[in-house]
Amino acid sequence: MSRRSRGLQALAAAAALVASTGCWEQWSVWWWPQMKWQKTVQAFEETGKAKFATFCSPCHGLQGLGDGPVAGPPWGKGPFVGVLPLAGPAGIAKALTDGHIFTTISQGRGRMPSYKRIPADDRWDIINYVRTLSAQPAPAPAQTAQAAPGAGAPGGRN
């Protein structure tokens, strides 16, 4: 028997062994167990919640209802009137795209200051956490443009 044919036989036997066991990983508990049994964690669940509590909850409240300690009427008792609720029945986050919320956090809007000091990744974590508060996914950009009155043409005319 030639050296080449012995090599092919060995390769065929190894392939048959792997094929008969299904997957090489399944017959050895010592190969890559850290990947097979590791705990999965969604980063925005805890990171986003912590950042939201630090930067957003003074105005928007811990649940995003617009009732933070500095928010004024109609939801809070503080000095800043017009804080919008992000979640709950009056929540506006359901109608806004993730990009819109990111831009609002980054550049500010109305009484809301710019939060560019928050790293971009943390801003995205906050957005994901806001989505969990409102329990709805972001709308598609086309749906938002159709839902907003006057969004189709300059000057607010369609």
Image (tube, helix red, strand yellow):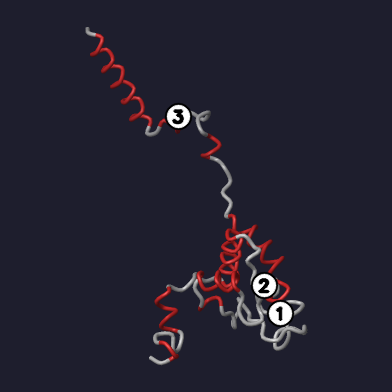
The mark nearer the N terminus, 3 or 1, is 3
Image coords of residue 87 (percent x, y): 60, 76
> Do the numbered discs 2 and 1 sit on residues whose CB atoms are within 8 Å?
yes
Tell me residue 18's x, y (percent).
Answer: 36, 28
Q: Which mark is residue 63?
A: 2
Report the residue at 55% width, 40% height from top: 37
Q: Which residue is mark 1?
A: 67
Viewed as shown, does residue 75 lie left or right of 146? right
Amino acid type assigned to the residue bearing label 1 in the image = Asp
- Residue type beneath disc 2: Gln
Circle 3: residue type: Trp
Query: Which label sits on residue 154?
Result: none
Q: CA distance from mark 2 to mark 3?
A: 48 Å
| Up/down of 16 relative to 150, above or below | above
Of labels 3 and 1, the one closer to you: 1
Give the quadrant of the N terminus: top left
Q: Secondary structure at mark 1?
A: loop
